[in-house]
Amino acid sequence: MKTRTIKSLTVSPIGMGCMGFSHGYGKVPEESYAIDAIRKAHDFGCNFFDTAETYGREQFYPGHNEQLVGKAVEPFRKDIILATKLHIATEETENKNLYDVIRAHLEKSMQNLRTDYVDLYYLHRINEDLSLQEIAAAMGRLRQEGLIREWGLSQVNAKQIKEADDVTPVGAVQNLYSMVERDCEIDVFPYCLEHNIAVVPFSPVASGFLSGKVTTETKFEGDDVRKFVPQLSKENINANQPVLDLLKTYATEKNATNAQISLAWMLKKYDNCIPIPGSKSIDHILENLGSWNVELTDEEFTKLDTALNSIEIHGHRGIAETQQHTFSNNWRNKQ
């Protein structure tokens, strides 16, 4: 396993998204199972764990996922990289200093996570009512104070990254990216490669589609966000079958799984790419992490990438999201 970097942070090439243990993917497992899953991921070699202050609000309460992750990683906290995210509501900032508002969020997250610092602190979505430059300045102050080590943005384009990066260097950008969601290739990856910024793809296996285990017969129940993922409509599952067929060919040749090939592809494509697949299943978590042992040769990668470029993709979510215009708002309104 070759490690990767997020500015001053050294991480495993694949991290673990922990949201599904609290909400977003239907029925959640027992807490003991979730804690065991996180610890098994760590034992496997993963040292990069991702959560957010809002994860849990659908079935439990804000902070539930942070508390779960904090409990799970407490025995080895100093050996890992913890990432969490904050949302800033416009009304919170009325007659208040933006730094004070952000710090209050951070202190609550640190309490939940049982830690006195956060390695990577993201702005979960840009709030169009607030100054991104002022937020960047506040993040710089928190970093100087040793409360955070690096900071990042989520679901942003290159222009927004630059606006923030010019104030306080951005460590990571957490955007939607997979074989069927490739907007980041337009300007995000080029900018981030040039400015030493990591790109941390969420849903890198396209909410399970690229694993081949999600079919037109799969039922998404409760708060499962996959009911509203564009590629997972029945018509688009059928239309995007050529992508799965392509993956299956390479999976058979490499004695790997479809999901592993899709993750190995992005690791090979970009040196600054650190995907964070999420799953509720220990077997799937370890399968995803095992992707860092699947190596595509230059020839295999070129053939795979060229073939993928020739396939028309059906369904698109993209990265054009803010707090005012988000995918999460859309699916909640449809529930």
Image: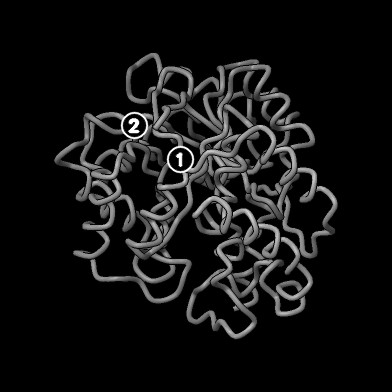
Q: Which residue is located at x 39 percent, y 32 percent?
A: 1
Q: Residues within 10 Å of mark 1 (few under 14, many from 20)?
A: many
Q: Residues within 10 Å of mark 2 (few under 14, many from 20)?
A: many
The dot on residue 102 is none
**Residue at the location (38% across, 71% down)?**
59
Secondary structure of the residue carrying tag 1 is: helix
Q: Say which amino acid is labelled 1.
A: Trp
Q: Left or right of 228: which side holds 66?
A: left
Q: Position of residue 263 (x, y in %)?
A: 55, 47
The answer to whether residue 74 is above or below residue 146 is below
Q: Position of residue 290 (x, y in %)?
A: 41, 47
Q: Tell me the quarter of the image containing the C terminus.
A: bottom right
Secondary structure category for the residue under label 2:
strand
In which image quadrant can residue 266 be found?
Answer: top right
Which kind of residue does numbered mark 2 sit on? Answer: Val
Residue 229 visible in this rendered orientation of the protein: yes
In-image side of 167 versus 8 (left or right): right
Q: Nearer the viewer, residue 36 or 308?
A: 308
Q: Measured along the vertical axis of the image, is residue 57 above or below residue 63?
A: below
* Residue at horizontal 65 percent and vertical 76 percent from the top: 334
Residue 219 in picture, x, y percent from top left: 54, 83
The residue singled out by tag 2 in the image is 118
Sequence-first disc among 2 and 1: 2
**How far across and down, in percent of the image, does residue 148 sit?**
37, 25
Query: From this viewpoint, is residue 52 visible?
Result: no
Residue with the most extreme left position: 75
Provide the residue designation for mark 1: 292
Report, in whole angstroms, how far the alpha carbon at label 2 lies from the one at label 1: 25 Å
- The foreground one among 220 and 205 is 205
